């Protein structure tokens, strides 16, 4: 997917028509757009998503106000007024034009939510342009909405990309979308179970009641599993929705003069609590791993001493195995014939010499075996001592972290009480709302865990019943045939599940390697990112799990975006050059980001500005003036095909006009005008 042009018409902060040329050169993949706070950078970022999906990100306020305020105010009651976004791009050799607009007859002074209209046109290699039926479906096939958050994002909010179970699930879904494995998932979860169910219904209940009963039980359990899974998904969405309400209330509290200091303290404490909880989870995981690998050693106390005493006695009695030398001599004496062929008679000098040699034979081997046994027992004692020391230290660390969490929770509870006691109605209302939705989220997460446990229990019951169905004695040939067919469906399902698991793991490993590569180029500390089997993103330090700051989370997010872009491209290249029907998915995607540096310090800003052009083949970056100075500006300009200034025009004569320096020229940045709007102006590179 290669972006060509974005055209805005009366869209939110943009009055009239504004055009953004997005074409880039191979060695200069960036388009830079500079704008101050409030100029419309977030609106511009959301224009891409609105054109493609008809929705805004959660941080956009008053989402119903799509049409520019002046265009709306100038329209007479009853007269038509409209706003639109047109996005032109190329994908797999076909040129697409996506137009999403709102056109209404004005009925009141205030705008209301309206359903936008979508038109999609495609121009093929023959040059003919035609409308696309089911345009939204075509867009979803090109860039599924599940991948949207990884290619259109706000850097300042990137830290939330990998927090919460619902986000981890979204990462998993995005991976499967990249792989184009939804068809295999549908086969596993929809088509094959449906076929199995249909086959089982052919069993004659009268002639084979037991088999029919087992089939009915499987169908009933499958329905229960689907219902529980749907409940779990709803609870996960509810928890996410409740968290958004909590975030909104906290944002409002941060803007209130009397509540802001307390809310900032609570936010800080919440982050510290989360960091300590992550540390606690790592300590517990480390303890489980240590016990699973070496826990048995704790039960060997006394056994090693007994073995050593027994071995010492055997050594002194020369009863330890002594190797082949002694047995060889025993054979000679028993046979009565020397190896040279002479007879061996008792009480003769040759016989006595062999007996003497037999006594000494293998003593070196005995000593070697004794040294080995002694060493192993000593190692066992040392390992047991190390295990007990590790477990003791781990328990102490867990106790320390728990105490820290309890202390921080107590501090946060005190902040909660102070906020509830602020004698301002708005603050009390916001705090009660925050508390209400926080409790709702907690209840939803508890219920979600219960549903997950119930789901696992039902799956176990299904597995047992299916084995009973397979092993049951069938009364007639027809039932036996159905059994064989159902078993074949189960085998195919198992094969598909294995393919799905292998392909998903393959991409997880690719992502993990790429994230490590990108992160190491940006981050100066000896931390290592890692995506685990559950697609949770961790940051490891030499001491264990690192306590991640907002900036470190942002660098992690950027590394992930770069990894997703690279893996998607690799999959697309593999698909292009392969005849394997299981090779699918992948594409080349652009990255559009607002505030890529977030709250990072200058060192990391410079490193990221060098790394950004390598993330993907096309990147649109929206920046404020404070984020584009010195080396950062040099690095960004070096990779830019074109640059734009998002100029704010305000009727407020008291506002100071500003300029931004680009290529040693002062470009208008904030100007006076008749009404509030923003203008896109191209700057000569």
Image: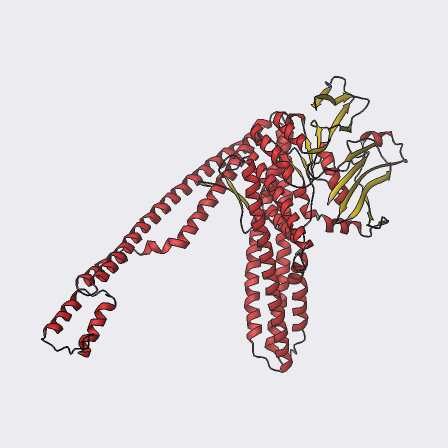
Q: Is residue 115 visible?
A: no
For the residue pair 279 and 35, the one nearer the viewer reads as 35
Q: Position of residue 569 (x, y in %)?
A: 66, 48
Q: Quadrant of residue 418?
A: top right
Is residue 138 placed above or below 112 in the rendered structure? below
Is residue 256 placed above or below 2 in the rendered structure? above
For the residue pair 378 and 249, the one nearer the viewer reads as 378
Q: Residue furthest top?
A: 654
Residue at 23% across / 71% down in the picture?
327
Is residue 259 placed above or below 461 in the rendered structure? above
Residue at 59% across / 37% down in the picture?
554
Q: Quadrant of the N terminus?
A: top right
For the residue pair 131 and 484, the one nearer the viewer reads as 131
Q: How is the image coloured?
A: secondary structure
Q: Is residue 219 left or right of residue 537?
A: right
Q: Position of residue 506 (x, y in %)?
A: 58, 54
Residue at 59% across / 30% down in the picture?
606
Residue at 64% across / 58% down in the picture?
227
Q: Quadrant of residue 656?
A: top right
Label tally:
0
Q: Is residue 311 visible?
A: yes
Q: Is residue 545 left or right of residue 144?
A: left
Q: Position of residue 590 (x, y in %)?
A: 70, 42
Q: Position of residue 236 (x, y in %)?
A: 62, 49
Q: Is residue 299 left or right of residue 335?
A: right
Q: Quadrant of the C terminus?
A: top right
């Amino acid at each position: 997917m290669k972006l060509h042009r974005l055209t805005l018409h009366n869209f939110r902060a943009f009055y009239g028509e504004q055009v953004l040329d997005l074409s880039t050169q191979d060695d200069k993949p960036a388009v830079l757009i500079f704008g101050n706070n409030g100029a419309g950078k977030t609106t511009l970022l959301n224009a891409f998503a609105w054109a493609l999906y008809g929705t805004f990100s959660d941080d956009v306020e008053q989402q119903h106000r799509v049409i520019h305020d002046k265009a709306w105010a100038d329209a007479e009651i009853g007269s038509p007024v409209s706003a639109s976004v047109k996005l032109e791009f190329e994908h797999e050799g076909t040129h697409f034009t996506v137009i999403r607009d709102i056109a209404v007859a004005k009925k009141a002074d205030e705008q209301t939510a309206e359903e936008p209209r979508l038109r999609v046109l495609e121009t093929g290699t023959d040059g003919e342009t035609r409308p696309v039926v089911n345009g939204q479906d075509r867009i979803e096939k090109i860039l599924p909405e599940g991948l949207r958050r990884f290619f259109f994002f706000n850097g300042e909010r990137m830290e939330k990309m990998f927090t919460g179970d619902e986000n981890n699930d979204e990462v998993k879904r995005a991976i499967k979308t990249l792989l184009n494995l939804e068809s295999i998932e549908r086969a596993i979860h929809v088509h094959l179970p449906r076929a199995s169910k249909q086959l089982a219904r052919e069993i004659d209940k009268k002639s084979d009641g037991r088999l029919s009963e087992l089939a009915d039980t499987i169908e009933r359990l499958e329905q229960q599993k689907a219902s529980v899974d749907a409940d779990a998904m709803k609870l996960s969405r509810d928890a996410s929705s409740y968290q958004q309400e909590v975030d909104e209330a906290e944002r409002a509290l941060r803007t209130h003069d009397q509540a802001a200091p307390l809310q900032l303290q609570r936010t800080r404490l919440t982050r510290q609590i989360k960091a300590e909880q992550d540390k606690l989870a790592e300590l517990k995981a480390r303890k489980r791993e240590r016990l699973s690998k070496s826990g048995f050693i704790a039960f060997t106390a006394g056994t090693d001493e007994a073995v050593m005493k027994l071995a010492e006695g055997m050594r002194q009695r020369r009863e330890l195995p002594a190797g082949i030398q002694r047995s060889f001599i025993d054979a000679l004496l028993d046979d009565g014939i020397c190896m040279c062929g002479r007879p061996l008679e008792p009480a003769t000098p040759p016989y006595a010499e062999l007996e003497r040699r037999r006594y000494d034979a293998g003593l070196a081997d005995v000593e070697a075996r004794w040294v080995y046994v002694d060493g192993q027992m000593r190692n066992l004692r040392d390992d047991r001592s190390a295990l007990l020391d590790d477990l003791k230290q781990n328990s102490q660390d867990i106790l320390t972290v728990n105490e820290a969490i309890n202390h921080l929770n107590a501090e946060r509870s005190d902040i909660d009480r102070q906020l509830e006691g602020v004698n301002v109605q708005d603050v009390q209302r916001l705090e009660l709302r925050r508390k209400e939705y926080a409790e709702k989220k907690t209840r939803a997460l508890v219920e979600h865990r219960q549903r997950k446990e119930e789901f696992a229990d039902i799956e176990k019951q299904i597995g047992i019943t299916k084995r009973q169905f397979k092993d049951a004695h069938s009364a007639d040939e027809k039932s036996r045939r159905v059994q064989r067919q159902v078993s074949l469906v189960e085998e195919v399902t198992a094969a598909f599940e294995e393919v799905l698991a292998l392909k998903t793991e393959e991409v997880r490993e690719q992502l993990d390697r790429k994230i490590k590569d990108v992160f190491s180029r940006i981050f100066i500390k000896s931390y290592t990112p890692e995506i685990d089997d559950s697609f949770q993103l961790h940051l490891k330090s030499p001491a264990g799990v690192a306590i991640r700051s907002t900036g470190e989370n942002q660098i992690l997010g950027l590394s992930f975006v770069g990894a997703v872009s690279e893996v998607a491209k690799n999959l697309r290249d593999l698909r292009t050059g392969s005849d394997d029907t299981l090779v699918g998915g992948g594409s080349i995607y652009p990255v559009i980001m607002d505030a890529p540096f977030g709250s990072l310090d200058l060192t990391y800003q410079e490193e990221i500005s060098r790394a950004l052009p390598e993330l993907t083949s096309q990147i649109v970056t929206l920046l404020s003036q404070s984020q584009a100075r010195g080396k950062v500006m040099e690095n960004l300009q070096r990779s830019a095909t074109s640059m734009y200034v998002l100029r704010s025009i305000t009727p407020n004569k008291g506002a100071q006009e500003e300029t931004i320096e680009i290529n040693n020229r002062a470009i208008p940045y904030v100007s006076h005008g008749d009404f509030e709007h923003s203008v896109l102006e191209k700057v000569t590179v």
